[in-house]
Amino acid sequence: MAEHFDVVIIGAGLSGIGAAWRLQEAFPAKTYAILEARDAIGGTWDLFRYPGVRSDSDMFTLSYPFRPWREAESIAPGDKIRRYIEDTAAEAGIDKHIRFGAKVVSAAWSAGTWTLTVADGREINCDFLYACTGYFDYDSGYQPDFPGLADFAGQLVHPQFWPADLAYQGKKIVVIGSGATAVTLVPALAGDAAHVTMLQRSPTYMTVLPGRDAIADTLRKVLPESAAGRVVRAKNILLTQGFYQLARRRPAGVRKMLRSMAVRALHDEAYVDEHFRPRYDPWDQRLCVLPAGDLYAAIRSGNASVVTDRIASFEPEGIRLESGRRLDADIVVSATGLSLRPAGGMRLDVDGEPVPLGRTAAYRGLMLSGVPNFAYCIGYANASWTLRADLSHRYVVKLLRHMDRRGYATATPSYHGPEGEPLINLSSGYVQRALPLFPRQGDRHPWVMRQNYLRDVVTTPRADVTRDMRFEVSA
């Protein structure tokens, strides 16, 4: 007989542990399990182990609102984030509900129940399914087909699968890419490598944030820890949301400000204009965060440099560029982006019919049209992931509470309207490649996913769970 739970959460990362906290806080009598494909808690923060891996959002907003960040760093290293998630799970007893090595390959809805099939053949049943898997493909990263790669005599490394024993000290390293992973790796490697070159096809916007939050340090001295955390969290939310809105409304002014920041750090306007002046507007793609300007410092020291060019082919000694220049390399790091896949790549079926996620409409950015008793969690593109994730958890709790009070067994979002914008509206290559796999937005509320936490934090807790929702007493 398959085990049966009231709720199953897929994923024991930042989102899954937060969802479990909210669920058991609201419904201590409900049974639940967390199915985790890997053998450890942490999700993204357990997967990525490359040098320097860190948050690209401040920890006062990336952390849970119910368990404030207590460490000194505002931009924190990956091992501390992983430990924070582990400690949160242990403190609430959530770790006892986790089934490790349980990769869900399919979920089939029939007769009012989800039947989940795990990779090892086990089956688990539940009444409500909540996918907190994020949207990264944990099994494979994006790897372009570089011409001549077989001729390269050095070592090619992808950050998602960083070898623990990689000896890069004293080596010439080329990091291909200019996104968050690349700008993290370059300064982390530069101290020990002979030289690190960041090779980019085109520039990316960079913004500098302090590694520590001086206001947080001061408030912690005069306020109780929880109160200080709430104040700093509110301050950072207002600053980041305000900056995003400014960038969308006054892109030319923000572009000028970011350029000035780079010029002050590098003292070379021509270098900045060649390598740090993107063609697109700020926040058409996510901005890269440089804690204390570490990338700029590595460039100033001479230990790192940036080259803006395209790859013609790999050669035994390194990379030949379209300009004719050769970059010598002992190690090439392909920080060329991630692969995305929704719901952990599992197959969904409803009453024997497969559900193509790319043809569904996204209800409040967390449920799917025509799919009963199912929710998924994704964060904001323009702010800390957890801000939206926690709102999603709270909405799921509100929906379940409404169903319990009214005696409903199923809740199915119902949409009849035109296809709207993509669910993730960024121009980044890794996003554009995956858009057909993801649900679309609709043309009206509540089928539009806003990128505005200040608005969502007011409206989501008050949302009408009955709007465009079909309830049934029994399946």
Image: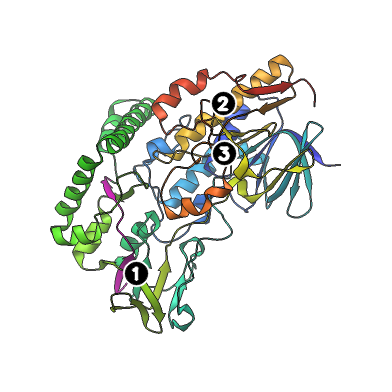
Upstream in sequence: badge 1 or badge 2: 1
Which of discs 3 and 1 lies nearer the camera? The answer is 1
271 or 443, nearer to the observer: 443
The alpha-carbon separation of the residues under discs 3 and 2 comes to: 16 Å
The alpha-carbon separation of the residues under discs 3 and 1 comes to: 42 Å
Magenta stretch?
191-210
Residue, far front:
418
Q: Which mark is residue 17?
A: 3
Q: Considering only vertical position in the picture, is 116 above or below 310?
A: above
Which of discs 3 and 2 lies nearer the camera? The answer is 2
Upstream in sequence: badge 3 or badge 2: 3
Q: Which mark is residue 395?
A: 2
Upstream in sequence: badge 3 or badge 1: 3
Q: Which mark is residue 310?
A: 1
Amino acid found under the numbered disc labelled 1: Arg
Q: Position of residue 42 (x, y in %)?
A: 54, 48
Snapshot quadrant of residue 368: top right
Q: Is residue 437 left or right of residue 274?
A: right
Amino acid found under the numbered disc labelled 2: Tyr
Amino acid found under the numbered disc labelled 3: Ile
Mark 2 is surrounded, within 10 Å at the Cα level, by few (under 14), some (14 to 19) or many (20 or more) other residues, namely many
20 drawn magenta: no
